Amino acid sequence: MAQNQQTATLSNLYAELNRFGQKQEYEKAVRIANKILQQHPEEFAAFNCKIVSLLLLGNFDEALQALNKDKTHSGSLKFEKAYCEYRLNRTNEALNTLKSVTTQDVRTKELLCQVLYRIEQFEECYNLYRDVIKNSQDDYDSERETNLSAVIASLQLWGLKDMSDPGLEENSYEICYNNACYYIGKGDLKTALEKLDKAEDLLKSDTDLTEEELDEELAIIRVQRGYIFQCQNKNEQAAQLYNQVLKTKPSDVGLVAVVSNNVVTINKDQNIFDSKRKIKAATGDNLKHKTVSHQRKHINVNQCLVHMYSNQSEQCHQLAKKLMDQHPELDSPLLIRAAQFVRDKKIEEAVELLQEYVKIHPSEAFKAQLIISQLYLNQGSVYLACDALKALGDLAYKPGIVSTLVALYLSQEDKESASEVLINAVNWYKKHD
């Protein structure tokens, strides 16, 4: 009798749980699910409903805690666990959870695509999206094609891989926008502008968007159009578009960061007060998941320049050194640091840094040695300037370098050294004729 009563109570609780779920009263659904689990901890259906309700409420942290605590049921809810981790920006954890799924269904693969996109594994993301599109037929094909176009644009835009135009139908402003980014990456700015114009037309014809939503989406298109103008050295037009966007105070902090950084690039060593405000907007702690690593690198380089132009020597050196350690492939942090040493009137430190640069990047020796030579000349150290030019090896015999060396030695009334330069140059050309 007691068993029958217990079964009836459980059935009643599930009926209540189902009713709250259908009415989208998810907080009440969670309470009922907890009530079931207190009495019947083995009930997977109740645990599943609890987790789904928490996800629909946006309570990802609470859902993840419940999944981590309940080892009995969580093994069957790896997708839900990965989704919580993804939404909480625990992206690498989400990746590991998804990779542990032995048989991946479409939704698992699609979440994995989003995770791969966020961690900038664009090529793997591209291959997986193609697999999903090829092996699924449902109402989400157009959304997948939009996402695929974003991945292709990223591969091309950030110089990771030369991609072919996939020929996706441009039936949405998102695909047109992504294709514009793709053509920017290709260097075809004319076609990119045409795609942005088409994207804007499609956007304005979307009657489902509110005025606020329309402004937010138009801002993205205008920023990209501004970037194209900037690439074409039409800085006035670019700045006008950027300022127009910033005046609307877009909610997308990533977009604000990119616009602000672009304005700093246009400002260069002018409008320092404005640049300091803009770079602050581009370097907040909340931007890590709103910008890609390529953008963050260039924002940090601009921050370094703003420190230098603002006479913040210590901050400039600290950030430049940090960037040199984090991104050894970048030339600019080292060169900025050398420039800061010059501003600090520490010429020897600047020269040492540039010589270190030559060792790391022998192909850049010509440019670096010319800079070193100029630094010595600015100090009035003509012979040291000549030594820097002569350290160019075979490049020291270029006609322009030879004539410069001769002129410099003659300026010191050192006819012997000038003559030696000419004789060495003649002998070099005889040997290499």
Image (cartoon, rainbow, N blue to C red):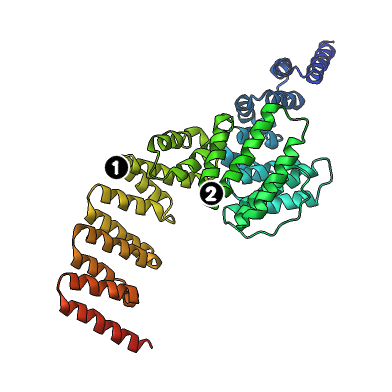
Which quadrant would the N terminus be assigned to in this image? Answer: top right
Q: Which residue is mark 2?
A: 234
**Residue 102, image x, y percentages:** 71, 46
Q: CA distance from mark 2 to mark 1?
A: 32 Å
Decide which of 210, 267 is in the foreground and name it. 267
Residue at 71% of width from left, 35% of height from top? 76
- Vertical side of 244 occupied by 411: above or below: below
**Viewer-nearest of discs 2 and 1:** 2
Indicate left or right for 377 with 433 as reference: left
Task: Assess disc 2: are there few (<14), some (14-19) or many (≥20) residues with their C-alpha within 10 Å of its C-alpha.
Answer: few
Residue drawn where x is 53% and y is 35% of the image: 243
Q: Position of residue 154 (x, y in %)?
A: 62, 50
Amino acid bearing label 1: Ser
Q: Is residue 212 visible?
A: yes
Under circle 2, the secondary element is loop
Q: Which residue is labeled 1 in the image?
A: 313
